Image (cartoon, rainbow, N blue to C red):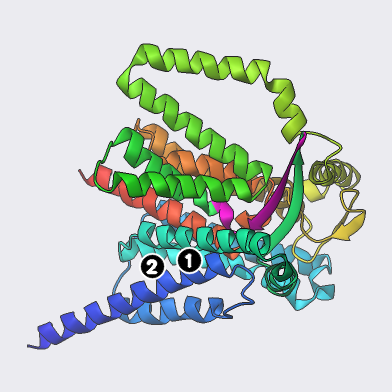
Amino acid sequence: MTNSIKYLYGEKYKTLLYACLALLFLDVIIDPSNKIFHAKYVLFLGVFLLWIPLHYKKTVNLSKQILFTVVFIGFFMPLFALSVGLTKSFANNSNMAELVYLNSFFFFFLLVVIITENIQLRPVLNVSAILLMAITAFSYFLPLINPGLFAKLYAFFVMEKEVAVYALRNYGGFTLLMVFYKTSPILVFPLAYYLHRVFILKIKKNRGIQIGFILALCSTLFLSGTRANILAMGFILLFYLLFYAYKNSKPLALLLAFVYLAIFFYGANILAEVFLNRSEVSNQVKLGHLFSYIEHFSNHLGILLFGQGIGSTMYTTGINSVVSVTELTYFELIRVWGLPVSIVFSLILLIPIYYEIKSSSISHLFIAYLAYLFIAGTNPLLLSSTGMLVLVYVFSQTFSTAFQNEEI
């Protein structure tokens, strides 16, 4: 009887744990700035308060690889950035908002909870995708129906809550009203997942719903207006069309590959004009950031070794101002942490890709993760709490699959 009570008690805690973790993912994805629900840190703490009793006086068995990954990202990186920032007195003169930036890395400790409890996060990611699509559609089409509401939506989403961006984007001679929800890059994961189900696995159950979901995901990524989102979407779509052709007819796949190459070479000038036009404001900002990083590193060679740490700033011609963070994430990594730490972090990011290549299979996670890392190069999302949760999702999927294969 006692064992039954303990079992029921444990199952109750596991159910609450999963609910709290799911709410945390939904909250961070829908409210990345933590200014709508103000629940991010409460839910984060709640996850560990529910998980610790399940493993009280128990040994948590994790591989050395997982432990190193968690400790390096979740503990060493924020500690290193804080230590360097304090040593150079940057952190002493920083406001609390800049220091809270380091809290994002602590979210990587959730990987331990997810792996030990074998929690599947894909359903949560799919629900988050549905909510993101609904919010984007609402934010985009409501002002078109009632222009008088645009000012209110802009004030709420952009100015007050800082979760979205409204802008006009020029692609060659084409102008697009963009509604970029800051966590929209995560949509590449459900997009690759459902394309894999439809084109590769050929699952017929609810096929119409899945195709509708794919179209909605593509529309949302397109309306986000960012080049990285659109290019990542195009990469995933083209890959699965080619993969589908290869699975059904190798001559057709070769023909399709030839068509892709022909379009790329003959359309390179058009693509360059559309996506790399230096006169476009967004491109001017990014190029300004890039040249400023190069000059900054050239003038301060010591940064390449130890970084500047948290609270540090640099001048960028991109916006003609001093900034503490830019969109060029991988250069920002070097500026804050230096080359040695950045290289180790980058190698850790490649672990999921390594396991995919080692298994001789290309899953939807592999394709989506490549697209996400591409987007992260021009988006500060990677080093935020949302970015850490995405990494937790990818690594939990990777490690669970890899260790299952090793056991078999």
Residue 181 magenta-highlighted: yes
Q: Is mark 2 on a helix, strand or loop?
A: helix
Task: Report the predominant secondary structure element of the magenta stretch.
Answer: strand
Residue 177 magenta-highlighted: yes
| Quadrant of the frame with the N terminus | bottom left
In percent of width and height, residue 314 lies at: 86, 56
Q: Quadrant of residue 3?
A: bottom left
> Would you name the residue on which mark 1 appears?
109
In percent of width and height, residue 346 lies at: 59, 45
Regarding residue 56, the answer to whether it shows in the image is no
For the point 89% across and 59% down, the residue is 322
Q: Are marks 2 and 1 in contact (CB under 8 Å)?
A: yes
Q: Is mark 1 on a helix, strand or loop?
A: helix
Mark identifier at residue 113: 2
Amino acid under label 1?
Answer: Phe
> Height in image: 9 above or below 200?
below
